[in-house]
Image (tube, rainbow, N blue to C red):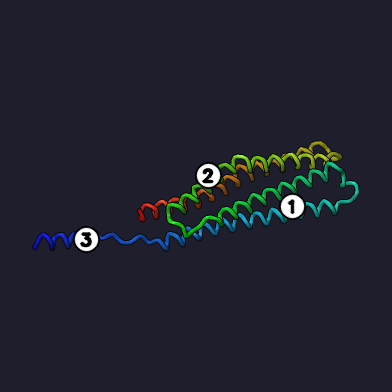
Amino acid sequence: MDNFNELHDVWKQAKTPAPNRKNNLSQIKTNKMKLKQKEIKHASVLIFTGIFILGLMLSFDGKLQTLPIMSAMIIISLACFLQAAVMFFNARKISQIDDSNTPAVHLQQWLDFREFQKKQRRWNMPVYYILLSVSLAVYLYELLKAVEFWKMSLAFVLTYSWMLIAYFYFGKRELKKQDAKMDGIIAELKELETQFQ
């Protein structure tokens, strides 16, 4: 009988608490919503920017409404609209991730989105910045061709310095933040998956 009591005591001590799935899932849902809202917010700002640039172009006087300037401004606006479309597409893909699936399926959906996002980053940002750079070069050259060379050079240096800072510093920092959120979601889902196996 003592063996049974000892076994019973060991049984009681060996109980592990049930995983706290609700807290993990609510944190995952919160991060998912933040990622989606950030994509939508940035896309909306880009659409507004593209519309503003087109409005600015239409308000120019006759001297500035040359084919190169107008073409450059249209391409800049199109770059904004295309980037916004990519961001809305990402927000839709995030929305399609089903939180009610099992942790394994839910984890796989996030891993698939993560892989899609990595592939997209390889071509998306370089194409966006190349379109923007070429269009801005044409725009600035046409706008400033009548001024002194040093003033034109200064405008180019300031503009492209800002673009390089935006791409290599702010862009990389933003990507790190997104990666941290994605890594957090994936880590929590992996933890849930191991708890429920």
Instruction: State which tag comes first along the sequence, 3 or 2.
Output: 3
* Label 2 secondary element: helix
* Label 3 secondary element: helix
- The residue at 84%/40% (across/down) is 147
Q: Nearer the viewer, mark 3 or mark 2?
A: 2
Q: Is residue 6 left or right of residue 136?
A: left
Provide the residue designation for mark 2.
115
Badge 2 density bin: few <14, some 14–19, many ≥20, Cα 10 Å:
few
Q: Which quarter of the figure is the N terminus placed in?
A: bottom left
Determine the CA span between mark 3 and mark 2: 43 Å
Q: Position of residue 137 (x, y in %)?
A: 76, 39
- The residue at 74%/47% (across/down) is 78
Determine the CA span between mark 1 and mark 3: 64 Å
Q: Which mark is residue 50?
A: 1
Toward which corner of the image does residue 19 lie, by quadrant?
Answer: bottom left
Q: Which mark is residue 13?
A: 3
Q: Position of residue 188 (x, y in %)?
A: 43, 54
Q: Position of residue 142 (x, y in %)?
A: 83, 40
Is there a contact, CB below 8 Å, between mark 1 and mark 3? Answer: no
Badge 3 density bin: few <14, some 14–19, many ≥20, Cα 10 Å:
few
Instruction: State which tag comes first along the sequence, 2 or 1.
Output: 1
- The residue at 55%/43% (across/down) is 118
Q: What amino acid is at disc 3?
A: Gln
* Label 1 secondary element: helix
Q: Is residue 24 left or right of residue 18?
A: right
**Can I make out residue 145 in this image?**
yes
Q: What amino acid is at disc 2?
A: Glu
Toward which corner of the image does residue 156 lie, by quadrant?
Answer: top right
